[in-house]
Amino acid sequence: MFDRKIRIFMAVVEEGSFSAAGKKLFMSQSAVSQQMTHLEKELGLVLFDRESYRPKLTKEGQFYYREVKRLHDDYRGVLDYMNQHIKDHITIGFNCMFDQEVFTTIVQSFKGCSNEHIEFKYLDLGQYKEVFENNIVDAVLGFGAVFQHDEQIIYRKICDLEVCVGVSLNHPLANQDTIDVHELENEPIVAIGPEAGKELYRDFISSFYRDGMSPRIVKFVNTLMDLKVSIALNEGIGYLTKEICTPSDALHLVHLKNTHHHAELGVAYKDHGYDYIVDHFIEFYKQYKLRL
């Protein structure tokens, strides 16, 4: 980082003489002296009092050494911190909350253009907070409701997700694209149960109360796949995001109006050493989604 002349100057001060600095740096005494003369000319300052047997720092030289030494130590500290804390490998847990084809494409594209090594690990919906807390994965990609109020972790929002109502293809609502949430007051609902995630369930129920409604839940399931299958079999309607659905699910999504139901995609992690990788992934994800 530092100009060669500055490093020679620091060696002279720390070794006590031009000759000792020369031995340390494999230079002749005259070469060291010449470099110090060039440095003084560049600075327009006299750094050494050369009248004594050993070079003695002038007042300006003392100030200059103190400041460049501080900068040098700060720089070494930055390098040491980066070597110890800035990481290029991360294991991210995720569950089936995406169109798998789209998500797989994003992941593979990111791996192809990134210097960081990211391993993605599939997790069941009900376990993905537990495995994160037990350090089985370094980070978790999931619904923000699970992590965004936990002060013990670092949570970063990636993007908002639209919550829709999913119905079977032969349901009376299958011919509608939009509906006011209050028109669903008496509809039977299939829902992800509290065993699959207390935070998700709590957020789900509170959204109904904020809408001024009481949900009529007729069945609880533990996975997103079970939720989609139950809806497709017309066992009830279900609240889910567009990102988890594909044409093969045989569902129709109806957009909601006047509702507090919402969701967001985010990533949770515990170590700031992963900030760089997470920043890179979030930016890549956003840019890739814009192109879809």
Image (cartoon, rainbow, N blue to C red):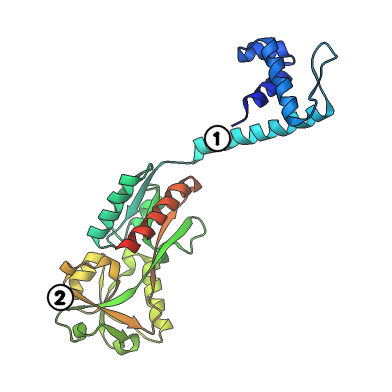
Q: Which residue is mark 2?
A: 233
Say whether residue 14 is visible. no
Which one is in front in this view, the residue at disc 2 or the one at disc 1?
A: 1
Given residues 68 and 85, the one toward you in this image is: 68
Residue 236 in view (yes/no): yes
Q: Classify residue 262 by image quadrant.
A: bottom left
Amino acid at dot 1: Leu
Up-down relation of residue 135 to residue 65 (above or below): below
Q: Is residue 86 above or below residue 216?
A: above
Disc marking residue 137: none
Whole-angstrom CA distance, mark 2 to mark 1, is 58 Å
Q: Please, what secondary structure does the residue beneath circle 1 have?
A: helix
Is disc 2 surrounded by few (<14), some (14 to 19) or many (20+) residues within 10 Å? some
Residue in the image at 38% along x and 45% along y: 90
* Residue 269 in the image: above or below residue 219: above
Which disc, if any, is residue 79?
1
- Between 32 and 206, the one lying in front of the other is 32
Residue 64: image location, x then y, percent: 75, 31
Given residues 192 and 42, the one toward you in this image is 42
- At which x and y percent is residue 117? 36, 42
For the point 45% across and 41% down, the residue is 87
Density class for disc 1 (Cα within 10 Å; few <14, some 14-19, many ≥20) is few
Say left or right for 53 vs 152. right
On screen, residue 128 above or below 237: above
Q: Amino acid at mark 2?
A: Leu
Please state the horizontal and vertical placement of residue 243, each as a whole percent of the image. 29, 66
Residue in the picture at 29% in, 63% down: 292
SS label for mark 2: loop
